[in-house]
Image: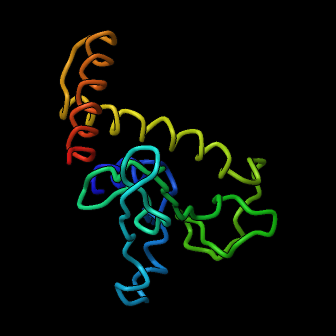
Amino acid sequence: DSELAAAIMSIQAIKGVEIGPAFDNARKPGSQVHDELFAGGEQGLRRETNRAGGIEGSMSSGQPIHIRAAMKPISSLVSPLRSFDLATLEAIQSRFERSDTCAVPAAGIVAEAVVAPVIANALLEKIGGDHMAEISERLEAYREALRMRITRP
């Protein structure tokens, strides 16, 4: 959780991060928050909800990872704010400078880019490997070991 949050917080103007609906979950009892685990399904186990946002106990639950970030508004405004001149300390209005009107779409692309290596590093830490063929082979072996654990009598 912390590495994902740190990656997102490293993006300019991001002021808050949640994994799953964390802030809503904080106001609810555990019985309304925790994702129940059921036997069955395509992979031997299934969950009907993803309120943990795909991360439980700092590990992937195998569900999609949902991260939301709060971003402050861009600094430049059409309507000037009050300010002052540093040289004279005289009250002035800030000047309007042409800029983007919304930085959220760009921040979303940057967020995907900064989260990808965090997830890749976690995978490599778990299974190792230094080239894609080896990583793919080890990932499949890991998945098979999990399947055997789940489906054994």
Closer to us: 34 or 88: 34
Position of 69 relative to 107 (above/below): below
Q: Say which residue appears at 64% left-offset and 63% top-offset.
A: 73
Residue sitting at x 81%, y 63%: 78
Q: What x and y, as percent, mark residue 106?
A: 64, 42
Badge count? 0
Please, is residue 133 above or below residue 108 in the view? above
Would you say 54 lies left or right of 83 here? left
- Residue 58, by quadrant, is bottom left
Horizontal side, residue 103 vs residue 25: left or right: right
Quadrant housing the N terminus: bottom left
State the residue lying farthest toward the front: 153
The foreground one among 151 and 91 is 151
Measured as percent of width and height from the top left, residue 112 is found at 51, 40
* Camera-side residue of 20 and 104: 20
User: Relative to residue 43, is residue 150 drawn left or right?
Assistant: left
Q: Quick check: 132 left or right of 58?
A: right
Image coordinates for residue 93, horizontal then vertical, percent: 72, 70
Residue 99: x %, y % from top left: 74, 47
Q: How is the image coloured?
A: rainbow
Q: Residue at x 29, y 33 (%)?
A: 143
Q: Residue at x 27, y 44 (%)?
A: 151
Using the rendered view, name the quadrant where residue 28 is placed: bottom left
- Going by the picture, which residue comes out furthest to the right? 78
Q: Check the image and report above or below for 136 versus 124.
A: above
Foreground of the two, 36 or 123: 36
